[in-house]
Image (cartoon, rainbow, N blue to C red):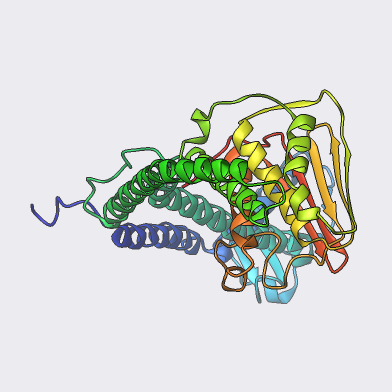
């Protein structure tokens, strides 16, 4: 392809735009410089003197005493000052443009001299200055308009590409372009495809791992339940067996939660979920963590209030938060308050460790691997984002308060 036929690169577009802008500005400047302000001033004063001369000639021809305008003087051959005798008919600016002006004319073989002071023409200076300011303002406005127009043309491809990326529009525009915009569009498309492939692999892995783990967990759970039923009630192994049963059941629920998190939020099955029975179920499951501790678990909830959501994910959020509160509160109370679609879980425990940011829980934080609470809070955060809910956290040495707003404030975004 000939270099003249190749599309301009973004760099060349900017250069050409600035060159055109400077050409336009310099055109205004050159046009303004073509005006001779002295000639303009002389023309205006000369026209004013000629207009007044016409009135004077008419008055003199009729034999009337002429009426002069303020600042004007009229002489004839008898009373003309000596320094004006030498002037022939015509217009003259005496001394300097701002001293005085003279118009000499003849009427009936009589020569007259009309002289005006420069004071009456001082307004011309202001007019000329205003004209110069107007020219400068027009140059600035034109430069602004041209700059805005060219900038819009240069940035338009970037704006369209950014909008397509934000809306996840595929395929991205300008992928066939040969300039920098095309390179950027192809890079975005490549990275978007890689991200989609990674997301697909992650979802496949989570689904496959969850399905593969379900079978051995079901076997372990069934065997543990059988052992618990066969053990005598006074056996010291009975508590361990019950713990195995509870742990496998929790793992099965977590696997179900992970499977749901791997789905598109728009395709999640949703139904009306009664909040109070769901919370009471979680409170009953938390009793082993409260055994032997002076902790009161209290619930204040409306009996019939429900929320339209996924039951399993809602149960996972409430269960993880209530379980953490029961597990880490050694004395005092845990209060669960439900008002409409808002659920507040407050405890009198030690609060979150300093290593945890209440606004952004990080999975598998180094300081949380031993305690295990980092994974639970991370799952809570992921589920909250997956459902489009909002969660606020307040933590201090006197305890934690988790406030959940269960009404989606926006359309849920796709999560990995």
Q: Position of residue 175 (x, y in %)?
A: 26, 46
Q: Quadrant of residue 389?
A: top right
Number of numbered callouts drawn: 0
Above or below, 272 against 279 in this view is above
Q: Position of residue 87 (x, y in %)?
A: 61, 68
Q: Quadrant of residue 330?
A: bottom right
Q: Nearer the viewer, residue 400 or 211?
A: 211
| Res. 66 visible in picture | no
At horizontal 34% and vertical 51% (from top left) the residue drawn is 198
Q: Is residue 336 left or right of residue 113?
A: right
Q: Is residue 223 left or right of residue 299?
A: left
At horizontal 84% and vertical 58% (from top left) the residue drawn is 292
Q: Nearer the viewer, residue 202 or 180?
A: 202
Looking at this view, name the residue that lies furthest to the left. Answer: 1
At horizontal 57% and vertical 37% (from top left) the residue drawn is 412
Q: Quadrant of residue 128?
A: bottom right
Q: Nearer the viewer, residue 77 or 245?
A: 245
Q: Position of residue 74 (x, y in %)?
A: 77, 59
Above or below, 190 against 59 in this view is below
Q: Nearer the viewer, residue 279 or 56?
A: 279
At horizontal 59% and vertical 26% (from top left) the residue drawn is 270
Q: Position of residue 394 (x, y in %)?
A: 80, 58
Above or below, 201 against 37 in this view is above
| Res. 313 visible in picture | yes
């Amino acid at each position: 392809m000939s270099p003249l036929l190749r599309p301009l690169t973004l760099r060349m577009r900017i250069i050409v735009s600035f060159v055109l802008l400077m050409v336009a500005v310099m055109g205004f400047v050159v046009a303004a410089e073509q005006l001779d302000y002295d000639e303009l001033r002389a023309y205006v004063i000369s026209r004013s003197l000629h207009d007044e001369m016409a009135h004077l000639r008419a008055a003199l021809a009729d034999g009337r005493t002429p009426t002069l305008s303020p600042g004007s003087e009229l002489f004839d051959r008898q009373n003309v000052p000596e320094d004006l005798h030498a002037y022939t008919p015509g217009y003259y600016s005496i001394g300097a443009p701002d001293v005085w002006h003279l118009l000499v004319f003849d009427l009936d073989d009589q020569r007259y001299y009309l002289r005006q002071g420069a004071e009456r023409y001082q307004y011309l200076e202001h007019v000329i200055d205003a004209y110069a300011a107007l020219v400068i303002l027009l140059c600035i406005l034109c430069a602004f308009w041209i700059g805005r127009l060219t900038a819009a043309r240069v940035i338009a491809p970037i704006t369209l590409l950014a909008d397509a990326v934000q809306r996840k529009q595929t395929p991205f525009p300008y992928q066939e372009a040969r300039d920098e915009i095309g390179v950027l569009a192809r890079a975005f498309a490549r990275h978007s495809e890689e991200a989609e492939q990674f997301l697909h692999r992650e979802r496949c892995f989570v689904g496959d791992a969850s399905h593969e783990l379900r079978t051995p967990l079901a076997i372990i759970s069934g065997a543990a339940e059988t052992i618990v039923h066969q053990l005598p009630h006074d056996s010291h192994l009975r508590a361990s067996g019950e713990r195995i049963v509870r742990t496998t059941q929790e793992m099965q629920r977590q696997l179900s939660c992970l499977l749901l998190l791997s789905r598109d939020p728009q395709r999640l099955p949703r139904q009306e979920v009664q909040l109070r029975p769901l919370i009471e179920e979680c409170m009953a499951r938390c009793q082993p963590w409260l055994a032997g501790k002076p902790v009161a678990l209290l619930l204040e909830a409306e009996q019939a209030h429900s929320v339209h959501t996924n039951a399993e994910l809602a149960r996972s959020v409430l269960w993880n938060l209530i379980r953490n509160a029961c597990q880490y509160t050694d004395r005092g109370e845990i209060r669960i308050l439900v008002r409409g679609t808002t659920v507040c879980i407050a405890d009198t425990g030690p609060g979150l460790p300093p290593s945890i940011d209440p606004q952004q829980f990080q999975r598998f934080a180094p300081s949380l691997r031993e305690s295990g609470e980092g994974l639970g809070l991370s799952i809570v955060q992921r589920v909250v984002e997956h459902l489009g809910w909002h969660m606020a956290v307040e933590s201090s040495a006197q305890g934690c308060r988790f406030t959940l707003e269960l009404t989606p404030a926006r359309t849920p975004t796709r999560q990995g």
